Image: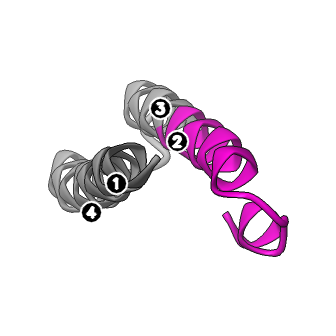
Amino acid sequence: MAEGFERQTTKEFIRFLYLAKASAGEVRSQLCLALDIKYIDKNEFEQLKLKINEVSKLISGLLKYLHSTL
């Protein structure tokens, strides 16, 4: 997101936001793996999952706003 913010156009910023949203999906995937191999417990998994879901929703909201300004 920071790299996209430094770009000169909203379209480029949007592109980097989509990459950040995909990265949030990767984090969710890694959380599932961490739970499966018992690196984290169910409680920690749920707390972290809520946080990454919130981050993903915030990025989606920003994307929606930026698309409306084009």
Residue at left 25%, top 54%? 61
Mark 1 crowd level (few <14, some 14–19, many ≥20, 10 Å Cα): some
Is 9 included in the stretch rendered in magenta?
A: yes
Mark closer to the chain start, 4 or 3 = 3
Q: Which residue is mark 3?
A: 25
Q: CA distance from mark 3 to mark 1?
A: 8 Å
Task: Report x, y in % for residue 33.
Answer: 49, 27
- Secondary structure, mark 3, is helix
Which is nearer the eye, 34 or 5? 5
Q: CA distance from mark 2 to mark 1?
A: 7 Å
Which is nearer the eye, 20 or 25? 20
- Secondary structure, mark 2, is helix
> Any mark on residue 51, and which?
4
Kind of residue at badge 2: Val
Kind of residue at badge 4: Lys
Mark closer to the chain start, 2 or 4 = 2
Q: Which residue is mark 2?
A: 27
Q: Quadrant of the N terminus?
A: bottom right
In the rendered view, would you say 1 is above or below 59? below
Mark 3 crowd level (few <14, some 14–19, many ≥20, 10 Å Cα): some
Q: Which residue is mark 1?
A: 52
Residue at left 82%, top 75%? 6
In the rendered view, would you say 55 is above or below 24? below
- Residue contact between numbered discs 1 and 4, judged by CB atoms under 8 Å: yes
From which residue to which does the magenta span run?
Answer: 1-24
- Residue contact between numbered discs 2 and 4, judged by CB atoms under 8 Å: no
Q: CA distance from mark 1 to mark 4?
A: 4 Å
> Any mark on residue 41, and which?
none
Kind of residue at badge 3: Gly
Kind of residue at badge 1: Ile
- Residue contact between numbered discs 3 and 2, judged by CB atoms under 8 Å: yes
